[in-house]
Image (cartoon, rainbow, N blue to C red):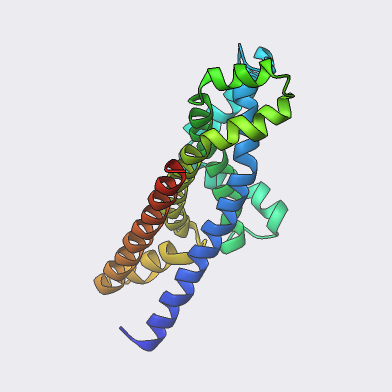
Amino acid sequence: MSDAMLARLGQAFLDTIAMVGVSAGIALLAGIPLALFLVLSSPGGIVAAPAAHRAVAAVVNGFRATPFIVLLVALLPLTRLLTGTTIGVWAAIVPLSVSATPFFARIAEVSLREVDAGLIEAAQAMGCRRRHIVRHVLLPEALPGLVGGFTITLVSMIGASAMAGAVGAGGLGDLAIRYGYQRFDTTVMAIVIAVLVALVCLVQFAGDAAVRRLRVR
């Protein structure tokens, strides 16, 4: 592999890290409040609001059911409005964030629902306010599951970022398509695949280690 190709590989790796990192941060900041709303507003929840719950759940399910490549194209007008372009790293962050947020929200919702109802009832019996229950009971007890779910989301986003290369988003996927597939360079394709596999394994290992540490506390 030439020095120029190595430089392209390094830049593509950094672009992928930027896309996934920024999008993951947005998904985390938006996904947890969304999951909390779905749990708290559900029938029998602390702040039951069935109508609002059904409406938000329908929107979340709609985005989750849409394939990423379709969502990528459908969001082009919004992407252009927010970033001024439809290609490149920053343009890919918009559909990645929109796709990852409901995905992570549903995983986080499952973790929050697994918190022992007895703990919530005990907190209510002691006169704790709703925000205190969320902050001191729900989130701490669900933290290992939230970290595990966020790890799954990161792995999914790495795959989605590679798919975004099909429309000129940059990153490892773009490198594999332009130089590996279109120019029939199997070496480039193999190296990109190896880098993606290594990145996924590293993320999964770090996430699993964090979950184990949280569960032994």
Instruction: Classify residue 53 as left or right of residue 213.
Output: right
* Residue 21 spot, x, y in % from top left: 55, 58
Q: Residue at x 72, y 30 (%)?
A: 131
- Return the residue nearer the eye: 138 or 149: 138
Residue 123 seen in this snapshot: yes
Residue 35 seen in this snapshot: no
Instruction: Classify residue 49 as left or right of residue 199.
Output: right
Q: Which residue is drawn at 53% across and 29% down?
A: 112
Compared to residue 159, the image places residue 17 above or below, namely below
- Return the residue nearer the eye: 157 or 71: 157
* Residue 34 spot, x, y in % from top left: 63, 33
Q: Quadrant of residue 138?
A: top right
Compared to residue 166, the image places residue 180 above or below, namely below
* Residue 87 spot, x, y in % from top left: 58, 61
- Return the residue nearer the eye: 55 or 31: 31
Q: In which quarter of the image is residue 36?
A: top right
